[in-house]
Structure formats: C-alpha cells, structure tokens
Amino acid sequence: LKKKKKKMTNKHKQMKDGLEQLKVTIEEPTEKKQFERTINDFMDLYERYERQKEEDRTVEWDKIEDLDENQLITLENIIKKQKEEEKDEEKMKMLLNGLVVLKLNGGLGTTMGCTGPKSVIEVRNKKTFLDLSIEQLLYLNNKYNVDIPLVLMNSFNTHEDTKKIIQKYKGKGVTILTFNQKKFPRIIKESMSPLPTTTNIFESKNQWYPPGHGDIYHSLYHSPVYEQLKEANKKYIFLSNVDNLGAVLNVDILAHLTNTNTDFAVEVTKKTKADVKGGTLIKYDNKIKLLELAQVPEEHVESFKDITKFKIFNTNNLWISMKGLKRLIEDNLLDDVDIIVNRKTYKETPVLQLETAAGAAVQVFNKSLGIVVPRSRFLPVKKTSDLFIVQSDLYEINEAGLLIKQTTTPNPSITFHDTYYAKVNDYLTRFPKGIPSIRQLESLTINKDVTFDDPSLQLVGHVVYE
C-alpha cells in the first residue's frame, strides 16, 4: 500500500534543513554518501514519530487478552515434542548449519566503571562475555562439524575497539562478522532541530546516539553481512544481548521453529517482584503484541506491575527467520511498530532520542510465537551485584563454555553501596581472595565499605552490613 505523502511541517522542515547544513560540511564523497543515507533513515524514523504522535496509539485496556495456545508455548513442551521426533546427526547438522548467532554489542561498560565495549568485561575465570560466546560456538562447530558464525551488531561507540579485539579470535574455528547500527542525531526538544553541530564523531560524540536494538532489522538487511548470510544459506538468527549469560543456543527451539515454519519467536520468562517493569506479551487485535510500561495508561500502571495478572516478561532472546526479515523490510512492515521516545539531557539542554525495541516487531511478522523459558535463560550482568552472582560458587563453566548453576534454589538478592562497589575495579579490590561461598545465601545488603579477605567465609541466610 502506498502511503500518502504528508505535507512537511515547520518542525519537519527545520529538522531536514539542519541535517542538510551538516551535510555541507562533509568534503569526502564516500562519507557524504553515507551521511545522506543517515539523513534518509533518520527522517523516515522522524516522520513515523510525527505520524504516531497524531494517531491515538493508547492501549485500550479492555481489549487486552491472554495469548492463545498457539501463540504461547513452553520450552518444556517443545522439548517433549522434539523427543518424540527422531533427530539424527545429519538433521542436527542441517539445522545448525542454517543458524546465525547474533549478539547486540553496542553498549559500553561505563556504568560499571569500565572503558570500551561491555563485551570485554571479564566475567569469570578471566573470560569475557565475548570469550564465552566464542567458546560456546567453537564447541558446537567442532562437535557437529558445522559453521555457526557469530555476528556482532556494534554501535559507533564500540566499532573501532571491537574491530581490534576480534583479531585475537582469527583462525580459532568461529567466523566473526560485524556490522554497525545507525548513528542518529539527538533532537533539541524545544526547537525539534538536530543537536549536532558537526558530523565529526570525535568532536560531537555525545550529540549522536544509536537508535535502540530495534534498529537491528534495517541495519543488518542493508549491510554486506546480510548478503554473506544469504549466500551461506542461513535460515534463522538467534539474537540476544551480549551481557545475557543465559542466552545460549537451544537446538530444540531451533528445530521447533523450523518444523512449524515460524518467522519470529520471543523468549519470555516468569516475572518476579524484581521484574515488574519488564515488557510483556499480550494478545491485542488478534495479534501478539509486546506491551512496555511506557505504553501503559497511567491508571493501569499498578495493574501492569501485578505479577499475578501479567506473569511473563521479555528476555530479549529473539529468533528471527531470514525470509521473515526480508519480508519485514521489503514490505515496510516496521512502520507500524511503536517508537520509544527516550528523554535525556545534554549539558542542561533537554533532548530526545527516537528509538525502537527489537521485540516489538513480534506484531508484524507473519507467524510469531512466545516461548516461556526457565529463568536460567535470562542471566544479564548489568551491575557488579550481577557480576558477584556469576563469579560466585553458584556457577561453574563447563567444557562447552556454558555457565552451569550448581544449586536448585533461586539466586539471592544482592544490594551493594554504589560508592564502594558500583565500579568493577572498586568491587574487585573488596574481594581480594575471591567471592565468599554464597550457596546458602538468601540476600546480601552492604551499605558500607567492607573488604572480604577470608577465603573460608560462608554467607548464610539474610546478611546485612550497615
């Protein structure tokens, strides 16, 4: 369907003119061409934002329904179904050879006091997030004699460093491919004009932003990597955040999606009180929809946070078929996905970032599915308190590079004082002899500066340092 060309508003024109002025400052022809693409892509997103502002996109609470049985399935049931079907080694090889593992690698480790990409923070046994991802794929490639590549979606913040870092994996048995997500200008809220005054990223780095992980679809499709994957006859992409240590390849899910010809699947897990703000899957207008807290009408926020009503949340472990991705872009299906307006401040100036979430595309794929998975498939490391858990005796790394839980009880809740523990180096200096045993710990709160230098120490029950 052709869309009617909208009349350009004053603010729209102001935005376009501001970007065109930036283009004039570029002399190098290739760079100028790339920037023209950036302008076009950004203006597409900006026009979608303007359209959506005029539409009433408020979620009508009474229209929310529970997902049907064919829209939400448990991993447990998938495994049962797969056990009933014979999977010989040839079929396994065929499935794995058609797979791509894609990690979102655009984030920096700054919130944990580190420089460079977050993926190079050491997690356990001196191994980084990236090391573990490579180990897992190397194990499978060797075991089944297949070629599962690792694809990294970088941002302008992580691209240069990542390019250097991955050199050490050359010739190690895993193909590593990279592409960059887009670089968009922050918007001055008052004037709705672009914030950057130059395209030189070294002079204006904080005036630009990567537009959320929903950018994966366009950025991958328009990159040389997509053509390489197509030529290699890849069928499915397993996408996850690079810092989610639980997001490991699952052949049963891959086989199920292949057998049912499913285009898109979102892994969800049961909410706890710590996850009340997490986006959930609902049935809305007969489609699966990802409902985020920001989309919830104010009078229904408490209902959204009720884990007895909304019982699952999105882990951002996504499975995408290559043919589904092609249709998504060529038919402009992403135009209907909600834009997230992220409000920030730059040197006391209120600015906006227009972003999209990868999981929100669940509503526009032909055949989508929610898969309820165990909590073990959601093990993100966002803070040093998360690092404390995965570095403790609750986990071990096996020969396949997988982090294996050593107990059956839920992980304890950990709260650290930010002043002493928020940065990785500060945190590590307070555990010079390693992490105490926490297998019998239920919760730990540290509200002062404590150094743990007794290697035989065991933390049991509820522990508080005031």
Image (tube, rainbow, N blue to C red):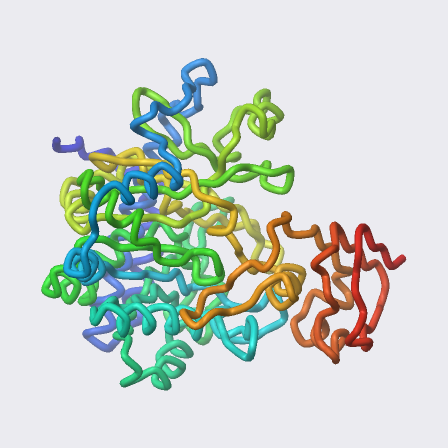
Residue drawn at the location 65% of the way across and 66% of the way down:
392
Q: Quadrant of the N terminus?
A: top left
Residue drawn at the location 53% of the way across and 55% of the way down:
379
Residue 230, horizontal then vertical, whole percent = 13, 60
Viewer-proximal residue among 438 and 39: 438
The answer to which quarter of the image holds residue 330 is top left
Instruction: Note whether 430 is above or below 65 in the view shown.
Output: below
Query: Going by the image, does 51 lie left or right of 295?
Result: left
The answer to which quarter of the image holds residue 105 is bottom left
Instruction: Note whether 123 is above or below 55 in the view shown.
Output: below
Viewer-proximal residue among 76 and 131: 76
The answer to which quarter of the image holds residue 133 is bottom left
Residue drawn at the location 72% of the way across and 74% of the way down:
426
Residue 362, horizontal then vertical, whole percent = 32, 37
Viewer-proximal residue among 378 and 168: 378
Instruction: Note whether 167 is above or below 447 in the view shown.
Output: below
Whether residue 177 is visible: no
Residue 174, horizontal then vertical, whole percent = 28, 75
Residue 365, horizontal then vertical, whole percent = 24, 37
Instruction: Note whether 348 is above or below 152 in the view shown.
Output: above
Query: Going by the image, does 116 lie left or right of 133?
Result: right
Whether residue 144 is visible: yes
Q: Quadrant of the C terminus?
A: bottom right
Please give the count of numbered marks on the rendered protein. Answer: 0
Residue drawn at the location 44% of the way across and 24% of the way down:
58
For this orientation, the residue located farthest to the right is 466
Query: Going by the image, does 459 lie left or right of 87?
Result: right
Viewer-proximal residue among 371 and 43: 371
